[in-house]
Amino acid sequence: MPFGDGTGPAGRGPGSGRGFGGGRGRGRLGGNRPGAGPSGDCVCPSCGTKVAHGAGQPCYERKCPKCGSKMVRA
């Protein structure tokens, strides 16, 4: 403790660490955001058709083979 005043070093103390809680989700490759990884499906929001997601082409660039709507990541 600097100077003996009980304050301690700057940035230390309760609530300043990386301890419990505060998780943000499934990690770098999980979820339905762009860059979510090669696995999973593309789903049509209009008719519900599922198509296997392929690496290199985002789901939002694909069109549904049944109705022609843009697909989303499932």
Image: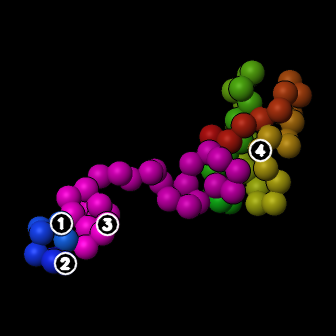
Residue 26 counted in the magenta span: yes
Q: Are marks 2 and 4 in contact (CB under 8 Å)?
A: no
Give the numbered dot on residue 11. Answer: 3
User: Which quarter of the figure is the N terminus placed in?
Assistant: bottom left
Type of the residue with mark 2: Pro
Q: CA distance from mark 3 to mark 2?
A: 13 Å
Q: Quadrant of residue 72?
A: top right
Q: Which residue is mark 1?
A: 7
Which circle's residue, 2 or 4, is located before the other in the chain? 2
- Neighbor class of circle 2 (other Cα within 10 Å; few <14, some 14-19, many 20+) is few
**Could one spot residue 66 in this view of the protein?**
no
Type of the residue with mark 3: Gly
Type of the residue with mark 1: Thr
- The correct choice, above or below, for 62 with respect to 66 in the image is below
Q: Are marks 3 and 2 in contact (CB under 8 Å)?
A: no
Instruction: Give the label, 2 or 4, closer to the camera.
Output: 2
Secondary structure, mark 3, is loop
Q: CA distance from mark 4 to mark 1?
A: 53 Å
Residue 20 counted in the magenta span: yes
Left or right of 66, for residue 38? left
